[in-house]
Amino acid sequence: MSEISTQPARVRTLEEYHAAYQQSVADPDAFWGAAAEAFTWRRKWDTVRGGQFSPEGQSTWYEGARLNITENCLDRHLEQRANKLAIIFEPNDTKTRHLRLTYRELYTQVCQFANVLKKNGVQKGDRVVLYMPMIPQLALAVLACARIGAVHGVIFAGFSATAIADRINDAEAAFVLTADGLNRGAKQIPVKSVVDEALEQCPSVRRVIVVEHTSWPVQMKPGRDVWYHDEVKDVEKECPAEEMAAEDPLFILYTSGSTGKPKGVVHTQAGYMVWADYTFRNVFQVEENDVYWCTADIGWVTGHTYGLYGPLLAGSTTLLFEGVPTFPSPGRFWEVIDKHNVTIFYTAPTAIRSLMATPLDNVLSYSLSSLRILGSVGEPINEEAWHWYDQHVGKGRCPIVDTWWQTETGGIMISAMAGITPSVPARAGLPLPGVQPVLLNQDGSEIEGNNQEGYLAIKGSWPGIIRTTWGDHERARQTYFQPYPGYYFTGDGARRDENGLYRIIGRVDDVINVSGHRFGTAEIENAINESEFVIESAVVGYPHDVKGQGIYAYVICQNGVPTTDIDIQRAEASIIEAVVAQIGRIAKPDKIQLVSGLPKTRSGKIMRRILRKVAEGETSNLGDVTTLLDPLVVDEIVAGKK
Ligand code: WTA
């Protein structure tokens, strides 16, 4: 144990994995106590684990400890790694020069940003909403919030003004950080004006700090809006880190669930830190000289844990990329890898599939010889994509880690550790130490043995578990902890194969995973129903070659099914516009079918099973439709399938 206490916990062989796993289950307090030793603590914990895990859903980790996560991301590295690169920034536009920040530079710039926040009245515990491009200032802003104990709530800069307003109001945020504009591939988004529109509905916001990025003209509201470059001019280059309690909130990240409104998943200081660090170093088997690139935007949880916190906690070099895989050409990812000698590359299956669909030369013309480990996240990776990734990107010599986890889990739960535990196509693999997955029957009983399928749940707590949903603990309790008392319920279905490796099948609730982004069907339906043409709608997912799942919307219009092309187009345009306005372009339906009715039971419940089958094209096997109020509506839906 004393050996582990000065070194961060790290598994290097299969035997060590099994030993670590056994210990993590047999004596979690000893295991996670040892894993936490290497950090900088202002005060150590009184207890490692606490709370009433389930059905109350109140986990605590490292209660009694006091710390600041940025001291562990920054200050702690200054002695050994001051001149090591912390961040490499690769801009959207290939003609713009990239930027590099050493740990020393990052430290100073985070301190300055933190001082700007303080100067503008941000205090410990305040919620700060960030709606920014994927630029270094976003990383600085996140860390600056954490430095002074403010709770950051990053919103992916693709959500609409209405979606931003909902989140700001839910979080009761008084501060917003944004930029003038954003370039993402060929797209341009005037982020400041989107924020302006949102703020018309947000009385709580007192101050907006704007980072200059594109130099597009923006409106600055006097008394509310300030430019970052003005504010930073005369601030100190040091900012003492606020001492936080282990269970103080670190961030809120909104994510979709089965019900209409996205919920604010809350993670706290100490447990999240230990989990981000442990999972990052172990899954990717990170070494000192790695150049690590996670392509996820910081607006998603993957960007939080594996774009920013995980790598910085480990003292690694992390690459931030502003652009998209296909701009200016579908070789961009590979060009960036060669340019910066990326050694570990972590992306989503949807990106792989979109690149697979382009000529192979786009990848074959790059060397990719620096790569040593590949990762996948966000959705199941199909075998074809796995093999393409392995063969053409990894050249058959890079272990692939297919990492299963969720916004709520804080970090990776089930995954190979690169080169150590088994990596099999279409399997996430074995659980990480500390994670006890189970497969449940509908009645909540555990399914024993291999070659079995069921609802995926997790027994017992782990350091990165969701603590609550912001402002509404009951919602978290009901969603995750009450369905199967004694377990955290994931909402996914899974299969345990003959070797005990887990294969994630997909969501078993009303959540659709589009290009690795989660949307609730109810959330999209609510948006569609805002259109003046619409009476009612039902949304389901269907298999999509590139996105994994596409969004299929069945919609009943005011005056029945429109008959002329022009009326159809008008209705469809209005439906799309409603979704874009309520949620954002990323939730746009892929297919819209205008129908005269929906298949409902006599009690008025929509039979989604039938809608799903039609959307999947499985119309020959719709099952029993005799319990429907109006079975004829099914014939109409089948006949009109898109
Ligand atoms: C899905 C993203 C299969 C799953 C980190 C989960 C996956 C949801 C995988 C969480 C994977 C994530 N294999 N499915 N490797 N990773 N998922 O909250 O359905 O955006 O419940 O977190 O994505 O999505 P979230």
Image (cartoon, rainbow, N blue to C red):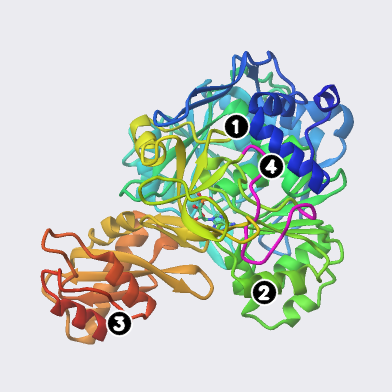
**Residue 170 occupies which quadrant of the picture?**
top left
- Whether label 2 touches label 3, CB < 8 Å: no
Q: Which residue is mark 2?
A: 330
Q: Decide if residue 321 is on the left or right side of residue 642.
A: right
For marks 1 and 2 on the same chain, the one whose residue lies earlier in the sequence: 2
For marks 4 and 2 on the same chain, the one whose residue lies earlier in the sequence: 4
Assign the C terminus to one quadrant of the image: bottom left
Comparing labels 3 and 1, the label whose residue is closer to the camera: 1
Q: Visible in this render: residue 232?
A: no
Q: Which residue is mark 4?
A: 279
Question: Looking at the picture, which amino acid does disc 4 mark?
Answer: Thr
For marks 2 and 3 on the same chain, the one whose residue lies earlier in the sequence: 2
How crowded is the residue under tag 2: few (<14 C-alpha within 10 Å), some, or many (20+)?
many
In this orientation, which residue lies closer to the viewer: 136 or 406? 406
How crowded is the residue under tag 4: few (<14 C-alpha within 10 Å), some, or many (20+)?
many
Residue 555, image x, y percentages: 23, 70
Relative to 334, say whether 217 is above or below.
above
The magenta stretch is: 418-434
For marks 3 and 1 on the same chain, the one whose residue lies earlier in the sequence: 1
Q: Which mark is residue 641?
A: 3
Q: Visible in this render: residue 348?
A: yes
Q: Which mark is residue 463?
A: 1
